[in-house]
Image: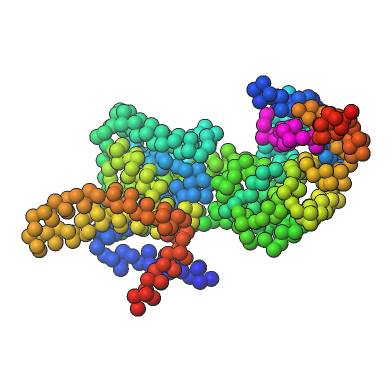
């Protein structure tokens, strides 16, 4: 059985099928890309994995255990961390307190949690913001804070939701470097991204979806040359 | 370190208070202040730190008060047993209430607590075989002197402040604040938000229940309209929190002092000053003024809250630096 597997998952909002029968498998240590046009259901898939929405159909397995049906916090306890596309910093807490709160998940004593929080902040390059309130951070650092906070829960699988959106080219390179560094530390990553430069350069496999259904799956080269993917992104004329 | 000494000094002054001010009237006011410190700390924990606005502090306060009163009347054991039991019972009651009502968020939860307040008052009014309804319950006071009550109240107030201070520095405290800041983010950080909200409410309720049991022992009388009062207890708890400073450890202490002082100032017509002025000048309309002023304390609360929200949105403790700067500036101008 694969390290992480989504089996025939679906989510209906009333009559609208936001995600409809999606299957995919992620191997341990992979960076797995998730692409698709706006509104194709990428973030909804994250919300399904993370338990924020209940599944309408299908099952999700992680490390040979079924995790669909668990509550969001239980899924985090099982070892799946996530970041939010629309960042959710704990505004009236400092960067350090944000990360510390997460660090308490697997460290019951405060000194151990403080230790982990400091290391995580350093790892994510947020050291100079440590004692700043989260509401005063620029967007690139807020995105980093999202990553730091989910890393502090010590996950085995990390869901990154458009971590590179809204960044300038320099920040983008730094973000890519950070994601690689996280993978090198032994985590498996599923990443949703719009910016092709990011997704093509870092993912080992890519799942392309449109209208909530899989249109292609494979290595970045295979997916990039797939007719349906080109059609979905550039229009029918290019797909032919 | 200086902060540490500051606290010790404050505690020393509070311990010495009955000797410094032997007049029973001021001791009585101070007991009320200390009771409000406990209620305010409880409110502050669930509403200030955890962000779940409680409009029904009186539900837990009244439960503690009635526990003590009923123990004395029905079971004929000392109402002092109500102190531990009132706190425990309020906590036991808060836990399932939280389990049901914390599925509601924001204003909907606040409304549920408002409803709880009214339900409790209604039960205490209608269940006459148990509570004697509107007649109320009379409990014999143990001491004639105010001093024993003062020290018990001081212990409860200091205990509440200490509990909040220790809590907010612990794992629980960080969890509470993260729930206030963003419940969805907290949940995805592995925090069981429903459970931790229940924990927060339970600790709050215990403090309020303790204060309620103290009230019964001290005042010697409870009736539904007094201990389950919406404006005199539930709203007052919110005012104590807001005026002193939401989500600050010492906010409820400052808020409790100011609110009790202010309400007493008006109730007594500026400590008899108005009546004195009426007598000294012989103006007949002063009697009318005195009468209206003594009923205007609620109006003064309203004005105070508006001023605090406009100029000190984080309360007196939370915006202490702003307040200090404003006061110093004025002094410099005057000189």
Vertical placement of residue A191 versus B313, above or below: above
Quadrant hosting residue B146: bottom left
Numbered range of the magenta stretch: A35-55
Q: Nearer the viewer, residue A186 or A192?
A: A192
Q: Position of residue A124 (x, y in %)?
A: 75, 56
The answer to whether residue B155 is left or right of residue A176 is: left
Q: Nearer the viewer, residue B162 or A195?
A: A195
Residue at left 57%, top 49%? B177
Q: Nearer the viewer, residue B202 or A141?
A: A141
Which quadrant, please, contains the N terminus of chain A? Answer: top right
Quadrant hosting residue B274: bottom left
Residue at left 73%, top 23%? A57
Residue at left 47%, top 65%? B321
Whether A225 is among the magenta residues is: no
Residue at left 89%, top 39%? A220
Whether A52 is among the magenta residues is: yes
């Amino acid at each position: 059985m694969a390290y992480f597997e989504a089996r025939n998952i679906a989510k209906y909002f009333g009559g609208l099928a936001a995600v409809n029968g999606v299957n995919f498998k992620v191997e341990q240590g992979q960076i797995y890309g998730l692409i698709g046009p706006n509104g194709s259901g990428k973030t909804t898939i994250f919300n399904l994995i993370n338990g924020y929405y209940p599944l309408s159909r299908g099952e999700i397995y992680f490390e040979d255990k079924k995790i669909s049906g668990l509550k969001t916090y239980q899924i985090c306890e099982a070892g799946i961390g996530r970041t939010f596309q629309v960042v959710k910093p704990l505004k009236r807490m400092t960067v350090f307190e944000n990360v510390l709160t997460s660090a308490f998940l697997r460290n019951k004593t405060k000194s151990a949690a403080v230790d982990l929080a400091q290391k995580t902040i350093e790892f994510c390059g947020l050291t100079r913001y440590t004692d700043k309130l989260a509401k005063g951070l620029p967007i690139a650092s807020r995105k980093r804070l999202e990553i730091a906070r989910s890393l502090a829960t010590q996950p085995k699988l990390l869901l990154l939701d458009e971590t590179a959106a809204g960044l300038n080219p320099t920040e983008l390179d730094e973000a890519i470097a950070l994601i690689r560094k996280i993978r090198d530390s032994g985590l498996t990553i599923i990443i949703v991204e719009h910016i092709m430069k990011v997704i093509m350069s870092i993912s080992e496999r890519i799942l392309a979806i449109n209208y909530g259904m899989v249109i292609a799956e494979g290595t970045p080269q295979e997916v990039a040359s797939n007719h349906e993917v080109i059609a979905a992104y550039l229009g029918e004329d290019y797909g032919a | 370190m200086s902060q540490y000494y500051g606290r010790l000094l404050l505690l020393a002054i509070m311990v010495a208070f009955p000797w410094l001010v032997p007049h029973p009237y001021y001791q009585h006011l101070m007991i009320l202040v200390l009771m409000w410190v406990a209620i305010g700390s409880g409110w502050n924990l669930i509403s200030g730190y955890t962000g779940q606005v409680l409009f029904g502090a009186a539900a837990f306060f009244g439960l503690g008060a009635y526990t003590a009163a009923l123990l004395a009347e029905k079971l004929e054991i000392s109402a002092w047993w109500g102190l531990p039991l009132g706190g425990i019972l309020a906590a036991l009651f808060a836990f399932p209430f939280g389990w049901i009502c914390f599925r509601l968020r924001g204003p909907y939860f606040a409304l549920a607590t408002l409803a709880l307040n009214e339900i409790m008052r209604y039960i205490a009014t209608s269940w006459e075989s148990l509570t004697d309804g509107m007649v109320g319950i009379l409990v014999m006071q143990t001491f004639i002197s105010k001093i024993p009550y003062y020290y018990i109240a001081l212990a409860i107030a200091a205990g509440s402040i200490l509990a909040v201070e220790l809590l907010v520095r612990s794992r629980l405290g960080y969890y509470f604040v993260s729930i206030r800041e963003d419940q969805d983010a907290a949940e995805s950080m592995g925090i069981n938000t429903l459970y931790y909200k229940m924990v927060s409410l339970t600790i709050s309720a215990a403090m309020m229940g303790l204060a309620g049991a103290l009230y019964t022992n001290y005042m010697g009388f409870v009736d539904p309209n007094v201990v389950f009062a919406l404006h005199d207890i539930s709203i007052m708890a919110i005012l104590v929190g807001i005026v002193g400073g939401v989500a600050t450890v010492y906010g409820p202490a400052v808020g409790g002092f100011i609110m009790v002082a202010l309400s007493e100032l008006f109730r007594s017509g500026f400590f008899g000053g108005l009546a004195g002025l009426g007598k000294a000048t012989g103006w007949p309309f002063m009697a009318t003024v005195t009468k209206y002023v003594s009923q205007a304390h609620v109006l003064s609360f309203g004005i105070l809250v508006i001023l605090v929200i406009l100029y000190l949105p984080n309360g007196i403790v939370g915006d202490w630096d702003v307040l200090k700067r404003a006061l110093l500036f004025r002094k410099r101008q005057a000189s």
